[in-house]
């Protein structure tokens, strides 16, 4: 058995079912083995960055580690944005890169880059494999590191000669991993748990802030139980957006500079903030010191490095979010006396949900369309949204049921939605899946319609077409800037023609009067469909 065979055998041991990739000379030995294993599905992307995004969408929906594989040099550098995007959102991923022959490393030969060095600041770990005999242990460790503690991307770089090297003995896949210095905490400290329970009992205006860590820990049920049992309202960060349905009476929406008014009002008035699986980074909490000054804070997170990084917590709790929430739920939690608090929030919530959006003849306002769309989606629909105004509108106004909203929250990578939706669809072909894109973002990834075509996917793509880089256009029209520049998307193609070229039918929506009818047509279309909505370039996310 050679290194390439050992790699594929190790991936099979990890129950890998799908790889998103792009071949090149230095990964050919592995690809040559892969072709003999039809039990591992393969999607050929059109740019390696999207292999990372597809693996991310796949991981987020399957709950497994997403795998991508590319060649050395430009293949590896193209993948960098995919790795950084996954890192910022703590997505479990293993990225495999081919590398030039090991005896030539460091000589800048054709298609050599130091990819382990390049991704060091934004990968959870990386390996440069110098001996094929190490491959099984490296793969075992890589999957363990990617999926445990705070998940994240792990890179395995394998020189071509190592892929071709014969292993000494029989293939042996390790059963256990023991990495010195890497033992993520699981259980929360009981003394701290007791303090949490007491703090909840004392609070008059408690508030839970749920982040992406709740999804990563599969702790949605526990979070809802805690909120419901103690009648604690819930705000969410962008990464936690779909944790609670919009119409849940305790749901207050998304916090932050681009968040819902009612969520920010709740945050401004709370006397106890329980942060669960969230970094409380700048986009969610603009002034953490102000929050610290005004209220007691509890911070539950698996990563000790997050505690006190953005906000000091009066009661820090490190461990697996699901385990900790269960530890709390096992206790007799005195229900806080929060009736007046809930009554006051009810009004904020009502005002937000009945907010009237502007109307313009011949255009569609994204908030209005999203409200209608959300009501028509299946209960467990997956929505992948890009970056820009389209992201903010979707996170703020798309009614959530019991599905998922996937977006690049940490890095804010344009072009994430379409490939992530392809990955999500690979993970669960039965679930209704949508990509919501801006016309700038879509043009960064529309070549991935190839996967939609070759795999005959039923993927719905909603394109907000404002012919500008909307969010930047909005920023440039606000002080201290003096006007727009370099944001008009002149030269964009006719998106209907693009879709047709990939065999995807399309619809156009130019006015809100036709909205319901066109949305029904769009959602009930058999197979994939692109819906292009005409949005005025001057629309802002504050309208
Ligand atoms: C890869 C990348 N490049 C640049 C940016 C900066 N950026 C943030 S939003 C945005 C505009 C997005 O335009 P579009 O996709 O058309 O969406 P809209 O804001 O119009 O909804 C840009 C350029 C980014 N987030 N990602």
Image (cartoon, helix red, strand yellow):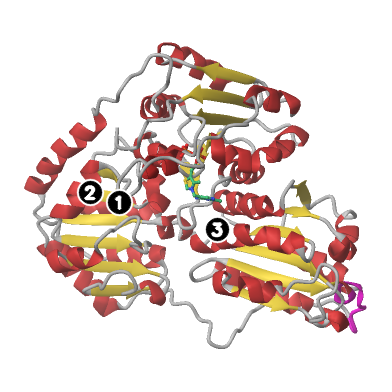
| Percent position of residue 503, x then y | 74, 25
Q: CA distance from mark 3 to mark 2?
A: 26 Å
Q: Where is 292 relative to 541, above or below? A: below
The dot on residue 85 is: 3
Question: Residue sitting at 91 percent across and 77 percent down?
Answer: 165
Q: Ligand 1 near label 2 (Cβ, under 8 Å)?
A: no
Which residue is label 2 attached to?
264
Instruction: Between residue 46 and residue 143, name the one nearer to us.
Output: 46
Instruction: Between residue 173 and residue 465, name the one nearer to us.
Output: 465
| Label located before the other in sequence (3 or 1) | 3
**Residue 41 among magenta residues:** no
| Percent position of residue 27, x then y | 84, 64
Which residue is label 1 attached to?
256
Mark 3 and 1 residues: CB-CB less than 8 Å, in contact? no
- Asked which quadrant contains residue 472, the reply is top left
Mark 3: few/some/many CA within 10 Å (<14, 14-19, 20+): many
Q: Secondary structure at mark 3?
A: helix
- Residues in magenta, as a range: 161-169
Q: CA distance from mark 2 to mark 1?
A: 7 Å
| Label located before the other in sequence (2 or 1) | 1
């Amino acid at each position: 058995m050679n290194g390439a065979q050992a790699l594929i055998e190790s991936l099979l041991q990890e129950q890998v079912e799908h790889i998103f990739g792009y071949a090149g000379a230095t990964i050919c030995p592995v690809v040559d083995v892969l072709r003999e294993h039809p039990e591992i599905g393969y999607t050929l992307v059109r740019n390696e960055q999207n292999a990372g995004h597809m693996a991310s969408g796949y991981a987020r929906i399957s709950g497994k580690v997403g795998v991508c594989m590319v060649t050395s040099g430009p293949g590896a550098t193209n993948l960098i944005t995919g790795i950084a995007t996954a890192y910022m959102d703590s997505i479990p991923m293993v990225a495999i890169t081919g590398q030039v022959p090991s005896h030539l490393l460091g000589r800048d030969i054709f298609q050599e880059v130091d990819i382990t060095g390049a991704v060091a600041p934004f990968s959870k770990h990386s390996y440069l494999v110098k001996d094929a005999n190490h491959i099984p242990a490296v793969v075992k460790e890589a999957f363990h590191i990617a999926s445990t503690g705070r998940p994240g991307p792990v890179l395995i770089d394998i020189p071509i000669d190592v892929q071709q090297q014969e292993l000494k003995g029989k293939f042996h896949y390790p059963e256990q991993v023991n990495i010195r210095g890497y033992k993520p905490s699981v259980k929360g400290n009981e003394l701290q748990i007791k303090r949490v329970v007491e703090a909840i009992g004392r609070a008059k205006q408690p508030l839970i802030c749920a982040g992406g860590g709740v999804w990563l820990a599969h702790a949605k049920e526990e979070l809802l139980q805690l909120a419901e049992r103690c009648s604690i309202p819930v705000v969410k960060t962008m990464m936690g957006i779909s944790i609670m349905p919009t119409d849940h009476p305790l749901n207050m929406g998304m916090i932050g500079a681009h968040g819902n008014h009612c969520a920010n009002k709740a945050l401004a008035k709370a006397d106890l903030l329980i942060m669960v699986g969230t970094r409380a980074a700048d986009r969610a909490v603009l002034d953490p010191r102000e929050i610290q000054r005004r209220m007691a804070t509890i911070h539950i997170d698996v990563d000790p490095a997050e505690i006190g990084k953005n906000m000091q917590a009066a009661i820090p709790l490190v461990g697996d979010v699901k385990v900790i929430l269960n530890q709390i739920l096992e206790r007799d939690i005195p229900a806080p006396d929060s009736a007046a608090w809930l009554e006051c929030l009810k009004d904020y919530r009502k005002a937000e949900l009945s907010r009237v959006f502007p109307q313009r003849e011949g255009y569609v306002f994204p908030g209005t369309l999203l409200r209608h769309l959300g009501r028509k989606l299946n209960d467990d629909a997956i929505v992948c949204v890009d970056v820009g105004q389209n992201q903010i509108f979707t996170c703020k106004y798309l009614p959530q049921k019991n599905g998922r909203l996937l977006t690049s929250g940490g890095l804010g990578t344009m072009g994430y939605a379409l490939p992530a939706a392809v990955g999500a669809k690979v993970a669960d072909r039965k679930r209704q899946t949508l990509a919501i894109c801006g016309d700038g973002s879509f043009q960064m990834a529309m070549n991935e319609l190839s996967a939609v075509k070759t795999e005959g996917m039923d993927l719905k793509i909603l394109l907000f077409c404002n012919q500008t880089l909307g969010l930047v256009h909005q920023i440039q029209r606000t002080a201290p800037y003096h006007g727009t520049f370099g944001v008009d998307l002149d030269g964009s193609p006719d998106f209907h023609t693009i879709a047709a070229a990939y065999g995807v039918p399309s619809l156009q929506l130019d006015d809100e009067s036709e909205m319901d009818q066109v949305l029904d047509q769009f959602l009930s279309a058999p197979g994939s469909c692109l819906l292009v909505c005409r949005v005025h370039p001057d629309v802002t996310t504050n309208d």
